[in-house]
Amino acid sequence: MPLLSRRNLLQASAVAGAYGVGIGIAGKFGFAEAAPEPQLLTAVKTEVMLTEAGPTRDIMSWGHDGMPPVLRMTKGRPYAARLKNGLDEPTTIHWHGLRIDNRMDGVPFMTQPYVYTGDSFDYTFTPPDAGTFWYHPHCNTLTQMGHGMTGLIVVEDPADPEFDAEVVLNLRDWRLGGDGQFIAPFRPRDAAKTGTYGTVRTANWQQEPRYDMPTGGLVRLRIAVTDVTRIFSLKMEGADATVIAIDGNPVPKRFPLDLLQIGPGQRLDLAVRMPDGEGAVATLEDIRGTAPKTIASLRAVGSSLKRAIGDLGPLVDNPVPKADLTAAEQIPLVLSATAENAAVESICGTLGYSFWAINKVPWPGDTPDPTAPLAELKLGKSYVFNLENTTPHAHPIHLHGMSFTVIYSSTREVMPLVSDTYLIQPDEKVQLAFVADNPGDWLLHCHIIEHQKTGMTSYLRVS
């Protein structure tokens, strides 16, 4: 008989509790139908050829096949995954952007225990929304994500319009030296500014990959920025690209991809109309910085299908509740720098500093004794974040478990986009409206991981 430890007890309670939720929450956020056989995701260390210098050691992924698998789910259908930890440190999985039951959210101390070496944890939920999402650990985050543990999720809707092809792009950097091996994941002086950039840029773990696509066809390009630092300014050369969804949700009105900035945690769905000439190449570029950088390219092959963007029907809106602005309560959120302090030690990793704060409170997260919640919200009530960035740097602010609608910006006109991550610019003030429709403690943090891990983290309590 195995020994009963506090760790085993916590794990057993968490897993058992997942199958005993009430009918109301089950129907909305996770367990309305029996879960299927779980997809096995084994966290491992491996080697992968990322540069010509030779295999990079200490890559972290789910499985030994290189890049984490693209997980495919169906809107409204149960999904199950079993995380088996083959790393030599604890880990978890957070399902970024998915509005699921709190116990499945993957945040240590807050929603589940660590998954220790050799242990496993079963995640079961039903995704209520279609779109492009992603998954990553929420433990020792800078190292585990920086070493490869970022994978994409495609939640399909049978009612989606038909494309001729699809490409899924996982955009991320690696901090490697000239020998192709990992170097220090961050520099404190950079963590206190924009963050520490990687040295090797990849799409799907390749440098400037090229994909053959049908000439004159319509391609759905699903993009996720899973990097720990880099903000992209995207444009398409050689083909017409139309923005059809941002952060998993259809845009209120489709528009051409002229130049669009997206940051860590954000996703972008494009409808790309391939050129009519066989052999023609369409190039996705990042023009942020001193010179354009090719991310990936699409080459036209075969006879032209002569499709048109106008052939595409609409994407179905996700069932995100609309806030009642006449009754909404205002919540101030001020992003700022803070006095440098030593961070609390944590088994889930610490960077050793605090540089950032939300409402003047720095919290690195992943500690057994978290600070008080930023706000305690009433289930079903409407709220508005009055988010203000008083720093000279941009911050992609991500809310777990719920989605908001952008209703105002002090610096630009905004569409009423439904999202879970907002890239707030320096000195910008924005209003984000949402309904507190998912009970539990939900993390709110900057997705530049050095900022998250040095104080720009808090959480909301919905009950």
Image (spheres, helix red, strand yellow):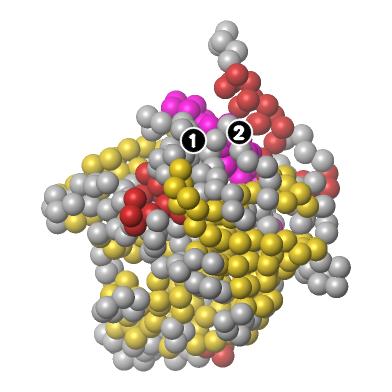
Residue 205: quadrant of the picture = bottom left
| Residue 90 percent coordinates (x, y) | 46, 32
Q: Is residue 429 left or right of residue 423?
A: right
Q: Earlier in the sequence, mark 2 or mark 1?
A: 1
In the rendered image, which quarter contains the N terminus? top right
**Location of mark 2 (residue):** 369
Type of secondary structure dominating the magenta stretch = loop
Q: Nearer the viewer, residue 322 or 441?
A: 441
Instruction: Tell me the quarter of the picture where residue 294 sits.
Output: bottom left
Magenta segment:
104-131
Query: Whole-percent x and y of residue 165?
Result: 45, 73
Is residue 116 on the magenta stretch?
yes
Q: Find the distance from the CA under tag 2 to the CA under tag 1.
A: 10 Å
Give the label on residue 401, or none. none
Quick check: marks 2 and 1 in contact, CB under 8 Å?
yes
Tell me the residue at 35%/76% (across/down).
288
Badge 1 is on which residue? Answer: 344
In this orientation, does residue 21 appear?
A: yes
Report the residue that reaches farthest toward the top: 1
Check disc 1 and give the amino acid type. Answer: Val
| 207 versus 102 height, above or below | below
